[in-house]
Image (cartoon, helix red, strand yellow):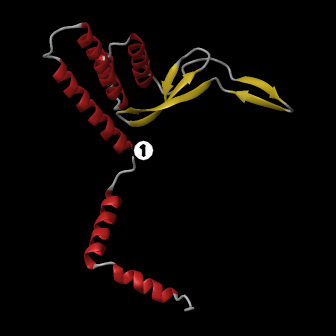
Amino acid sequence: MAEFSLDKALAAISERFTPEMREEQRKLTRERIGRLDPNSRAAKRRRFKRHETIVLAQIAELKPLPDSELKQVRMKNLLNRLAEALSEQGDFAGAIAVSQSPDHIAEFTSIKDAIKGSREITCDCPVVRARVGRDIVALNPRFKVKTIETREGPRSLIRCANCGAMNVK
């Protein structure tokens, strides 16, 4: 039985790749390097902008149809989807104007007010101290709800669990 030689194996593999195959591999590598991270801010903004465009096209297709209950339900759903896309891009005023859901309108309004407000804590709810085993732990009632897009860039939306006050940091 012949002994295995790594050099011979690599040479044999290398011979299988034609110059065209190597060029194609280089091209694919260049394309991969230029791609955006799917979780990056630019990729998310691009994704929600594309979603907004799709919803606007669906609304345009729905408008000429005869009025019916089904058309009203679809239009309401599309407008709510458009409001979500606008809010994810940081356009809360546009989301409030478009939304058909009172819950969404209230949420977008409170976020818009939090963005316009000061960056300082807006509630006076105390930090609760609790005993856990032998330790005393401070429980802060304010927590990060999510990261939102604003004109200044991404910000953390902070909400108080006790009173519901919100602000953006």
60 vs 68, nearest the viewer:
68
Q: Residue at x 29, y 33 (%)?
A: 51
Outermost residue, right side:
134
31 vs 99, nearest the viewer:
31
Q: Residue at x 33, y 54 (%)?
A: 35
Note whether 164 is above or below 154 in the view shown: above
Outermost residue, left side:
64
Task: Tell me the SS state at disc 1.
Answer: loop
Q: Name the spot of residue 118 as percent of width and height, x first.
A: 47, 24
Is residue 169 visible to us here?
A: no
22 vs 133, nearest the viewer:
22
Q: Which residue is mark 1?
A: 39
Horizontal placement of 145 versus 69: left or right?
right
Note whether 110 is above or below 22 in the view shown: above
Q: How would you rate the neighbour count of disc 1 (Cα within 10 Å): few for under 14, some for 14-19, many for 20 or more?
A: few
87 vs 166, nearest the viewer:
87
Outermost residue, front side:
1
Note whether 122 is above or below 19 in the view shown: above
Question: Which quarter of the rendered picture does the N terminus lie within?
Answer: bottom right
Q: How many marks?
A: 1
Q: Name the spot of residue 20 as percent of width and height, x first.
A: 25, 75
Q: Name the spot of residue 25 as percent of width and height, x first.
A: 32, 69
Q: Name the spot of residue 80 as percent of width and height, x first.
A: 33, 19
Q: Residue at x 42, y 25 (%)?
A: 115
Amino acid type, residue under disc 1 in the picture: Asn
Is residue 72 visible to us here?
A: yes
